[in-house]
Image (cartoon, rainbow, N blue to C red):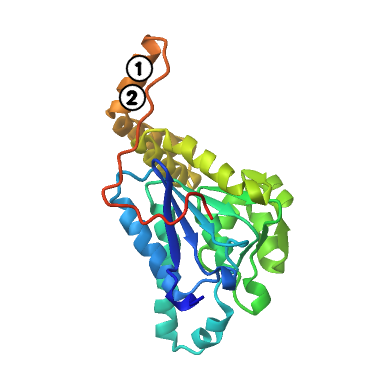
Amino acid sequence: MNHAAAPPLLLTRPRPGVVVAALNRPHRMNALTEETFRALSELCAGLREDSSARVLVLTGAGEDFCAGYDIDEVGRIAALPPAELLALLERQGAAVTALRDLPQPVVAAVDGAAVGAGLSLALAADVRVLTSRARLRASFVRMGLSGGDMGASWLLPRIAGYGYASELMLTGRPVDADEALARGLASRVTDPAELPAAALALAERIAANSPVALALTKRILQSNTDAPSLAVALEREASTQVVAAGSPEVQEAVAAFRGRRAPAPAAPEPPTEPSTNTKEELR
């Protein structure tokens, strides 16, 4: 197989409103390259304008999520002049920012390794579903690098707490799926064969909600994680609800309540362009 000709991401739409992006270098445990980072940023830019997409599922082709930055690239990158290296790191960081800033929720479906920059991509998602053989590792320090890379030093403490994040980043030790679940790094652990169904079921449940409500909920969660006080958080929530209250879905929910019936689901719009699907599931 000509790996060089393979696209860095495999994009599918297996369910209405659900977009699946699979990192597509299984022969390298989906190790990241500059091409992959660029593709992720471009994907997110497109999704921001895609009213048919309500949830993004990020996963890896094959048996691993992502083994981090491709080791074959590390030597070349380390030899770059400081200005070029800084520009490269900023481009990589832009992919993490793009995932966090998406209006659509992001579900990371993690099998096998999620290491280094691969862990950072998983942490950038809003929800993580792991398989029983998943292994997470903030491995930067074991390579002589700062443990703060690709947003790990910001994301990990907010998800799992400062003390626990410090231990993981200072030791570089692996975390198995059960520990990840206990520490809040995963919302669910499933058998490897059940990962596609579990991730898609979660994505469908999310996608059944109003896109306005989803975008505002994601935004307020991120904003209020660092709110300086309850008063500030309440003020932000009030502003968000003012925006949400005018959406048609709220009117339908009120009518359904008064009529003692279930509200009609907010059906996703059809894709504006033909899908490039090559798969029916995550992989």
From the top left corner, tell me how far across and down residue 128 is, in percent.
Answer: 57, 49
From the top left corner, tell me how far across and down residue 206 is, in percent.
Answer: 46, 37
Q: Residues within 10 Å of mark 2 (few under 14, many from 20)?
A: some
Q: Which of 83 and 73 is in front in this view?
A: 73
Q: Quadrant of residue 31?
A: bottom right
In-image side of 66 versus 3 (left or right):
right
Question: In this picture, is 39 found above or below 259?
Answer: below
Which mark, residue 32? none
Q: How crowded is mark 1: few (under 14 residues within 10 Å), some or many (20 or more)?
A: few
In-image side of 213 versus 26 (left or right):
left
Instruction: Give me the residue at 48% from left, 77% from top.
Output: 2
Q: Quadrant of residue 85?
A: bottom left
From the top left corner, tell me how far across and down residue 82 is, in percent.
Answer: 44, 85
> Do the CB atoms of the residues marked 2 and 1 lie less than 8 Å apart?
yes
Gap in angstroms between the C-alphas marked 2 and 1: 6 Å
Instruction: Give me the residue at 39% from left, 58% from top.
Output: 98
Q: Nearer the viewer, residue 74 or 221?
A: 74
Q: Nearer the viewer, residue 125 or 238?
A: 125
Question: In this picture, is 22 found above or below 248?
Answer: below
Picture quarter with the C terminus: bottom right
Type of amino acid at the residue the image marks with label 2:
Val
The answer to whether residue 256 is seen in the rendering is yes
Type of amino acid at the residue the image marks with label 1:
Val
Instruction: Give me the residue at 42% from left, 60% from top.
Output: 97
Residue for badge 2: 250
Residue for badge 1: 254
